[in-house]
Image: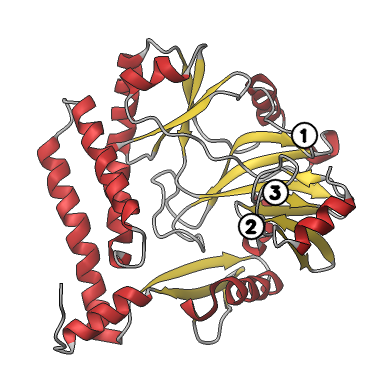
Amino acid sequence: MIERSQLEQAIALGRAQPLRYEGFSYVRLLEPVRGYPRGSAVLPDKSVVPGYPSIGRIQSLEAGLPRQFRERFWAEEKIDGFNVRILRYEDTLYAFSRGGFVCPFSVDRVPEFLDPAVFDAEPGLILCAEIAGPDTPYLEGSTPRVAQDVSLFVFDMMRLGLPGFLAQADKFTLLEKYALPAAPVHGQFGADDTEALGRLILRLDAEGAEGLVLKTDDGRERAKYVTGGSCVGDIGVCAEQLLDLPPQYFTNRLTRLAIFLAEHPQSDSDAAARALGRAFLEGLGDAVAQSRGQGRVSHRYRCRFRSEHNARRFIQHLEATGGRHVRIGAAMPRVEGDFWVLEFERLFDHMTGTLSSALAGDRQYD
């Protein structure tokens, strides 16, 4: 819990931001406050939804496992989606984004995937989950685990106001008892199981999966390890915004890919090289085609809502957080079957300006 005076001081210093969602008032932390990380949300009774911590990455199984893990760990599949924390507060279900906003899209869709009885039996429970699929409003890419629309994958659990995660055994019990959708778990390993984990990661790579999150029973020690294919996939879906992302986005993935291929020599490095070149060129080629055809470079999103009200709330959220970089489609949202569909695009200013100038014949200097 954060005291009122401490919260007021954080707001006055610009370290926290008061927000409203419908009639619900909350505060999102823009910086750490009293040990709670950025992205935490302070509820009206001053209890705290802890921010989800960043998970460190290991680049090499052989070198990284013995340095990072002193005990056995679970290998859980890393799902390519967006992170939400779900809880029920005063009989209403809320879903907070990684940044600490109540997400109207998640609030709308989460009830399709969860048995609310879990919150009756476990007051104060927070479900940490990934929403993934081709129709999310936040991501350019998707996961092979979801063919259409979106699905939910629970991967961690917290308690309101308490640091840390529920133990893996407690999480597994609740997942089974309430039939909650979960990220696949591929077994338990030790730091010397590099060959077995190597075989697992190569199988996941062939399936198009993103990688693994490795977690000890108490959840205190954890690390992520991604496939080579996920590095190429990230580059492919983001190449059209090459000039609008920091260079490290691409150089980090190139480095990971190089280390992955070196650590797994049985991988087809020639095929990876062809896929990498194709990822860059097809993405940039699409950007050029967009510039020629519509005079701007952007990425289009399509997502579905159960209620028109939530769709319009999400439009307000887009306009508040995206500003001039977001264009909402005409006559949105519209009805399609049992859903309200929202289509919009995010504009990439630097790619738009550079390609517009180049294709107009302007003189450019390197």
Residue 81 placement (x, y as % from top left)? 49, 49
**Mark 1, residue position:** 162
Please state the horizontal and vertical placement of residue 362, each as a whole percent of the image.
16, 88
**In the displayed structure, would residue 15 be above or below residue 320?**
above
Q: Are marks 2 and 3 in contact (CB under 8 Å)?
A: no
Residue 131 located left or right of residue 100: left
| C-alpha span from label 1 to label 3 | 12 Å
Q: Is residue 149 left or right of residue 245?
A: right
Position of residue 333 relative to residue 250, above or below, is below
Quadrant, the C terminus: bottom left
Mark with earlier residue (2, 1): 2
215 on left or right of 226: right
Q: Nearer the viewer, mark 2 or mark 1?
A: 1
Q: Is residue 145 visible?
A: yes
Return the residue at label 3. Answer: 40
What residue is rendered at 57% in x and 79% in y? Answer: 334
> Quadrant location of residue 319?
bottom right
Residue type at tag 1: Leu
Q: Quadrant of the N terminus?
A: top right
Q: Residue 8, position in %: x, y?
A: 83, 58
Q: Which mark is residue 106?
A: 2
User: Vertically, is 237 above or below 56?
Assistant: below
